[in-house]
Image: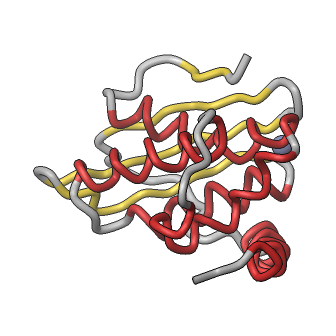
Amino acid sequence: MLVNADLRDLYQEVVLDHGRRPRNFRSMEGASAQSVGFNPLCGDKLTLFLHCEGDIVRDVSFQGSGCAISTASASLLTETVKGKPRHEVEALLAAFIEMLTGTEKSDPTRLGKLAVFSGVKDFPVRVKCATLAWRTLEAALDGGAGEVSTE
Ligand code: ZN
């Protein structure tokens, strides 16, 4: 089990790595859904592309510009949800949002690598950076119309 100090180190590592070299950072031809998310507090803006085949999220990618946290979070999101069935993706999404905004102390270890973002909860201004991609994914899963704003 990860203790807090380990998570902090991992967090630094993940945000630096994924912030500099985001995975699945591209647009997508023939996406089955796409959504735009905007966090006016920080200026993060991204478009999330989703390609589902039946119940499986076959491909997911994003484009946009934002701070290292929002970029790293979106990058890790794409790595995490790709290839997963929709109900698993929805469960992860709910758990991630809960970890960062919930009132209960959640157990981040069930989120695997995503748990590195648990410390962001102590920095309320940054919570919206970390959750932006997930809120945008939520909208894309719902059909993707319109723009998501954290405000
Ligand atoms: Zn940000």
Assign the C terminus to one quadrant of the image. top right
Q: Is residue 44 above or below residue 143?
A: below
Q: Is residue 121 above or below residue 21?
A: above
Side (left or right) of 135 relative to 56: right
Residue at (60% x, 71% y) in the render: 23
Residue at (45% x, 66% y) in the render: 110
Q: Is residue 149 above or below residue 1?
A: above
Please tell me which residue lies in front, 94 or 24.
94
Give x and y (percent) for residue 4.
77, 72
Q: How many marks?
A: 0
Side (left or right) of 70 relative to 35: right
Give x and y (percent) for residue 124.
84, 36
Residue at (34% x, 48% y) in the render: 91
Please tell me which residue lies in front, 89 or 37.
89
Give x and y (percent) for residue 53.
16, 54
Please tell me which residue lies in front, 23 or 117.
117
Dividing the picture into quadrants, the one containing residue 14 is bottom right
